[in-house]
Amino acid sequence: MKHEFPITRTANPKEKPDPNTLKFGETFTDHMFIMEYTDGKGWHDGRIVPYGPLSLSPAATCLHYGQEMFEGLKAYKTKEGKIQLFRPDMNAKRTNVTNERMCIPTIDEEIYVDAIKALVNVEKDWIPDIPNTALYIRPFIIGDSPELGVKPAKHYIFGIITCPVGPYYANGLSPTKIYVEEEFVRAVMGGTGYAKIGGNYAGALKAQMKAHEKGYDQVLWLDGIERKYVEEIGTSNAFFVICDEIITAPLAGTILPGITRNSVITLLKEWGLHVSERKLSIEDVFEAGEDGTLKEVFATGTAAVISPVGELSWGDRKITVNKGEIGSISQKLYDTLYGMQTGLVEDKHNWVFDIK
Ligand SMILES: *Cc1c(COP(=O)(O)O)cnc(C)c1O
């Protein structure tokens, strides 16, 4: 590692949770990484300190105007006890794309990855090692200048926190029920849809709550202008297998450029399958569902890796996908990606970063 950071160890280590009952994002480890940015000085004072509350001015920019961003990735422990990250360089790159959109100063990508490695190394005993568990890593940046003027902050905090997490689905890869959202939209061209920011999530909560109330697991977002083309499923990228074509929305500014999405496209092409990044109308999805040519629908993202969809509801139309069961492409993608992440499948792409 090129960059090293001072470590202040906690005087009160917490008890590790039972790996069999872990939920997502409820238990945090003993330490966190913190680095600050000050105008005129740049990023400085990267350090690992005991996990604990941040002290903020009540006037901090992030609290009023939402100048913040975040990322998400996982560290896995292999059967042999090795610790692996999956494509953390992509998270660093994407952070800077988001920062650029949010007027947050960019971060040296090597420092970023080294900070993640250093923190995971300190917390290595927290990485659960039973199947389908991992250490979830949450980098984030907030602007925290104590000024109410509407302008980019002059001081920022870059933090990384980590939490041991269990399987996304307690009963394996169970297909989800998805509600096609027609009232609310997630993003429009020229907006912030491609940036990983809390603002996109806050604006999406209402639709998610509505879908839950109606008995669905997630929403399928349509484009913000015509409400015609499919974009994302909840906070994941969406893929549709129609006849022998695998279709996902293009990176045109309104969807998040998922690292899992990118990995899935790469693998599918290598397997000789026909992948298209193109606009796909919800009408075409439902017609394919009704005439039997819609073979699989799945969502991709770090949390669940691959999440198959078993049912879609759009207005008064409902379709079942692959009899409500996981399809062969979804299963093969999950086995391959999860296999690489956990060291069971060979990584020919240099996607896996070892932590020494
Ligand atoms: C993080 C995220 C994804 C998935 O990205 P991965 O890099 O695959 O985890 C997809 N959509 C949205 C809106 C996201 O925030």
Image (cartoon, helix red, strand yellow):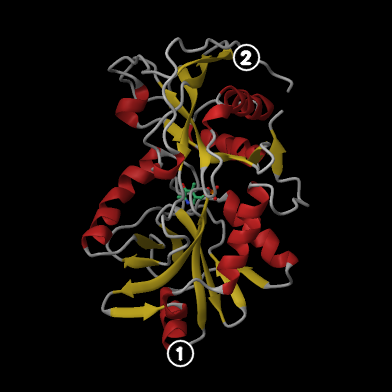
Q: Position of residue 24 (x, y in %)?
A: 40, 42
Q: Position of residue 60 (x, y in %)?
A: 34, 19
Q: Is residue 309 above or below residue 352?
A: below
Q: Is residue 168 above or below residue 223?
A: above
Earlier-in-chain disc, 2 versus 1: 2
Left or right relative to 253: residue 23: left
Can I make out residue 336 in this image?
yes
Question: What residue is drawn where x is 40% and y is 38%?
Answer: 25
Nearest to the observer: residue 281 or residue 51: 51
Residue that badge 1 annotates: 291
Quarter of the image where one finds residue 262: bottom right
Quarter of the image where one finds residue 170: bottom left
* Tally of marks: 2
The residue type indicated by label 1 comes to: Asp
Q: Position of residue 228 (x, y in %)?
A: 40, 70
The residue type indicated by label 2 comes to: Phe
Question: What residue is drawn where x is 68% and y is 36%?
Answer: 82
Q: Is mark 2 within 8 Å of ligand 1?
A: no
Nearest to the observer: residue 187 or residue 149: 187
Nearest to the observer: residue 160 or residue 233: 160
| Label drawn at residue 125 | none
| Label drawn at residue 5 | 2
Question: What residue is drawn where x is 48% and y is 87%?
Answer: 292
Q: Quadrant of the C terminus?
A: top right
Q: Is residue 238 above or below residue 317?
A: above
Left or right relative to 256: residue 6: right
Q: Secondary structure at mark 1?
A: helix
Q: Secondary structure at mark 2?
A: loop
Q: Is mark 1 within 8 Å of ligand 1?
A: no
Tell which tag, 2 or 1, sits nearer the viewer.
2
Q: Residue furthest right?
A: 348
